[in-house]
Image: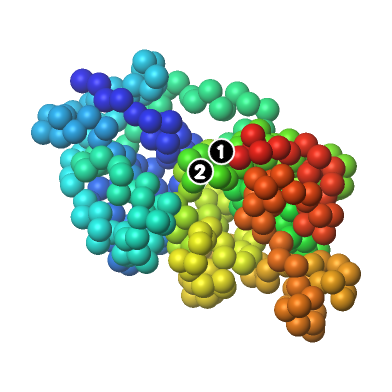
């Protein structure tokens, strides 16, 4: 028997196999899914903030695949198999309230989840044909990152999650982390993202300029992270930290509105949840305030070391970069390095 899988399914299956999502090594079943949503735990008690699930994309097979060894087909290629231990129909509305704090379809993570097929399957995948992205120059597995960390003699490594090209606020956070840690893993997520976010090629092009021209060569490891976004705000900050621990990170950077979207989460809600659950993650959080440009200070600052009022503040964000690009307006130097701005166009937005 065969089932068709999407690129997201393929990425997640491969990530489960190579330890990206450890301690999870299988697609969650119904009890795990409910436990994660309500208790941030797997059914065995292990801390886990977001579910790695497998939709059954052909709903006509919902009564036929339980207990079966099923071939996984991606773009007409046999890439692996899964032994199906459960077929179930999750209560998506209830799960959205717990996972995202809302069931508003204007939330891109909610909309994506609600549009998934109604039946999910559980089981441990075996992938024997690795996805094509594993041959790309900037792909590194957890073991490869750990090996590179050891090779460079980095005892401490900060993880930096992003879905954007680097602007001045990102650079401030990265440089601050390098004052604390020996090195940094800059790890852009390039799986499913909402429309309007930056493409993978734009992210690689922009970071290549920053890393090759401005950062110390030995201190920065750059690798792409193939996994879909949830846009689950505070919960996703915990998930991103857990994943980066699996890549050898000792520290994880959480800034302003981590993995947030719109006004669904409070600006520093992720800081609060990181403080609450840090002891369960075995990673140290770097809880950093959101940088901005102050017209009076004439530099990038945060509210921890700038006294000036709102009239002096120029907000730095990926949303601002995208808005100016779409309107074909100039990107100011305080927002993004001109060397990076010069290689970006509207076509770089997905």
Q: Is residue 183 above or below residue 225?
A: below
Q: Residue at x 38, y 35 (%)?
A: 9
Q: Is residue 113 visible?
A: yes
Question: Which residue is located at x 35 percent, y 64 percent?
Answer: 102
In the rendered image, the quadrant that contains the N terminus is top left
Q: Earlier in the sequence, mark 1 or mark 2?
A: 2
Q: Between residue 278 and residue 74, name the one nearer to us.
A: 74
The reply to whether dot 1 and dot 2 touch (C-beta < 8 Å) is: yes
Residue 195, numbered circle: 2
In the rendered image, which residue does mark 1 sit on?
Answer: 350
**Considering the numbered disc 2 on the image, is that residue within a helix, a strand or a loop?**
loop
Res. 224 image quadrant: top right
Counting from the top left corner in percent of width and height, residue 74 is at: 38, 22
Left or right? Give the position of 297 relative to 327: right
Q: What whole-number distance in Å separates the C-alpha atoms at marks 1 and 2?
A: 6 Å
**What crowding class fits label 1: few (fewer than 14 Cα within 10 Å), some (14-19), or many (20 or more)?**
few
317 is higher (above) or lower (below) than 75: below
């Amino acid at each position: 028997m065969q089932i068709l899988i999407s690129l997201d399914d393929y990425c997640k299956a491969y990530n489960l196999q190579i330890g990206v999502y450890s301690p999870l090594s299988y697609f969650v079943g119904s009890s795990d899914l409910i436990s994660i949503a309500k208790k941030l735990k797997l059914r065995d008690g292990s801390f886990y903030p977001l579910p790695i699930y497998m939709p059954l994309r052909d709903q006509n097979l919902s009564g036929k695949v339980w207990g079966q060894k099923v071939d996984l087909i991606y773009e007409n290629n046999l890439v692996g198999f899964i032994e199906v231990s459960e077929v179930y129909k999750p209560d998506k509305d209830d799960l959205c309230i717990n996972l995202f704090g809302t069931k508003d379809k204007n939330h891109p993570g909610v909309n994506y989840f609600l549009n998934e097929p109604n039946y999910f399957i559980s089981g441990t995948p075996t992938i024997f044909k690795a996805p094509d992205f594993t041959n790309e120059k900037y792909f590194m597995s957890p073991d490869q990152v750990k090996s590179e960390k050891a090779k460079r003699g980095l005892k401490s490594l900060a993880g930096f999650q992003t879905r954007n090209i680097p602007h001045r606020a990102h650079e401030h956070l990265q440089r601050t982390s390098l004052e604390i840690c020996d090195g940094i893993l800059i790890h852009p997520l390039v799986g499913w993202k909402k429309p309007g976010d930056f493409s993978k090629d734009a992210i690689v092009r922009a970071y290549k300029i920053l890393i090759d021209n401005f950062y110390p060569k030995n201190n920065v490891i750059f690798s792409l992270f193939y996994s879909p976004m949830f846009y689950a705000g505070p919960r996703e900050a915990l998930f991103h930290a857990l994943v980066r621990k699996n890549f050898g990170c000792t520290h994880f950077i959480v800034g302003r509105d981590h993995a947030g979207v719109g006004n669904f989460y409070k600006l520093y809600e992720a800081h609060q949840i990181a403080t609450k659950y840090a002891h369960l993650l075995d990673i140290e959080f770097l809880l950093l305030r959101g940088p901005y440009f102050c017209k009076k200070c004439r530099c990038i600052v945060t509210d921890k070391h700038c006294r000036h009022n709102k009239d002096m503040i120029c907000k730095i964000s990926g949303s601002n970069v995208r808005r100016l690009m779409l309107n074909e307006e100039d990107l100011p130097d305080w927002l993004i390095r001109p060397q990076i701005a010069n290689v970006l166009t509207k076509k770089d937005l997905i």
